Structures are given as C-alpha cells and as structure tokens.
Image: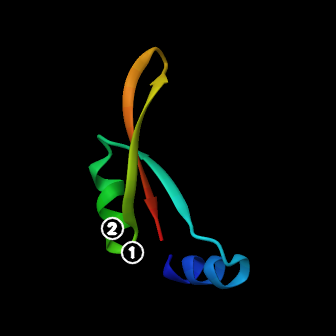
Amino acid sequence: MPMIFEYAGEEYKKPIVLEVRSFNKRAIKVYEKFGFNKIGALRKEVFLKNEEFYNYEK
C-alpha cells in the first residue's frame, strides 16, 4: 500500500485526501499508520441519518 501513496504523490504532486465515517475505527487506524493526518470533520446526511465524516490527508 505505501508504494501507491508514493507513486501518487510523485506523479500528481497533489495531496491524497481520504474521507472516512467517524465510526470506522479500523480504517482510521490504518490511515494513521500510513502517515495520514486528520484535517477536518463534517456532517452529512447519508440514508436519512446525520453522520460525521473525517477527512485525512497525506
């Protein structure tokens, strides 16, 4: 997985931004393990629920 991040960063020269639901603790742990930093949070209506999402960037 790290090779993908390195390639994307070198090839496109833009940060990689991911969005994850706040309750998805396993995904958050993986993103942080690979050096992503939480850059924000937002609320969205998804399937008639008001859920919180986190944005991560590397």
Question: Measured from the top left, where is residue 32 in percent x and y?
Answer: 33, 67
Residue depicted at x 33% and y 56% = 28
Which residue was labeled with disc 2?
32
Residue at the extreme top of the image, as rendered: 48
Amino acid residing under circle 2:
Glu
Vertical relation: 23 (above or below) 14: above
Q: Nearer the viewer, residue 43 or 29?
A: 43
Quick one: SS at disc 1?
A: loop
Amino acid residing under circle 1:
Phe
Question: Circles 2 and 1: CB distance less than 8 Å?
Answer: yes
Q: On the rendered structure, is 9 left or right of 39?
A: right
Residue depicted at x 49% and y 19% = 47
Question: Measured from the top left, where is residue 27 in percent x and y?
Answer: 36, 55
Residue depicted at x 57% and y 70% = 15
Q: Residues within 10 Å of mark 1 (few under 14, many from 20)?
A: few
Which residue was labeled with disc 1?
34
Q: CA distance from mark 2 to mark 1?
A: 5 Å
Q: Nearer the viewer, residue 9 or 29?
A: 9
